[in-house]
Image: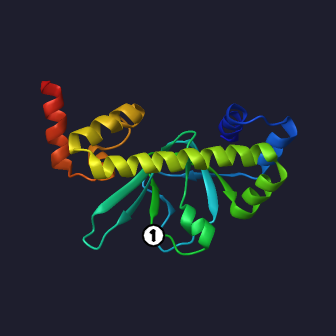
Amino acid sequence: MIAVFRNYLQEKGNFTESELDTITAAAAIKKVRKRQYLLQEGDVWKYNAFVTKGCLRTYSVDLKGIEHILNFAVENWWTGDRESLQTGKPSEYNIDALEDSEVALISREKYDQLCREIPAFHNMVSAILEKSFRVAQSRIHTFISASAEEKYLRFLEKFPHLVMRVPQNMIASYLGITAETLSRIRKQLVKK
């Protein structure tokens, strides 16, 4: 599966073969079985994780036992807890696999070294972080300003590939609505 990571790098940056070899050598492939944790709340996150296969979710559980999904990550997406990685503080989140998955893990030390030594890698990382910020900003805006139906329609528009891979109750959690509300919205949309 390192080939998937290498292909992604070739698409996203202008790397020499030597640089690609250096970057892929820094990554360790980890298999994560369905329902297995990649990160558990209270642990310190120490990696940058690139999904080469499967689907994972990042979520927290509140005091009532209700899950709140922050994001999903599928092939060619990055995942992890950036705050825990940067501060060394225990994570408030869980990351687990919704399908049998594989991730390329790069330790923070190796990742930082790659950013220092390979300008194209640093540029790629900067572009990814900028895009992540824009996506997060857009999601916050949608969350505070859109109706439940609008949230779902935007989800379908932005992530059509997730609809068949992620259970409806998890999509509802991601949208900040109940599963019953999502079910009602879906029925209404079918009637239209």
In front: 162, or 192? 192
In front: 67, or 12? 12
Residue 10 percent across, percent down from the top left: 72, 33
Residue at which label 1 appears: 92
Q: How is the image coloured?
A: rainbow
Q: Residue at x 36, y 49 (%)?
A: 141
Q: Residue at x 28, y 42 (%)?
A: 151
Please say whether residue 57 is visible from this viewpoint. Answer: yes
Q: Residue at x 24, y 71 (%)?
A: 64
Residue 60 percent across, percent down from the top left: 38, 64
Task: From this view, report whether residue 180 is shown above or below residue 61.
Answer: above
Around disc 1, counting alpha carbons within 10 Å, would you say few (fewer than 14), some (14 to 19), or many (20 or more)?
some
Quarter containing the C terminus:
top left
The three-letter amino acid code for the residue at tag 1 is Glu
164 relative to 137 in the view: left or right: left
Pick out the residue farthest to the right: 18
Quarter of the image for residue 51 reads top right
Pick out the residue farthest to the top: 192
135 relative to 109 in the view: left or right: left
Residue 46 percent across, percent down from the top left: 63, 65
Q: Residue at x 60, y 72 (%)?
A: 87
Task: From this view, report whether residue 47 is shown above or below residue 164.
Answer: below
Q: Secondary structure under badge 1?
A: loop
Task: From this view, report whether residue 185 is shown above or below residue 93.
Answer: above
Please say whether residue 170 is visible from this viewpoint. Answer: no
107 relative to 54 in the view: left or right: right
Residue 162 percent across, percent down from the top left: 39, 37
Quarter containing the N terminus:
top right
For the image, the number of numbered tags is 1
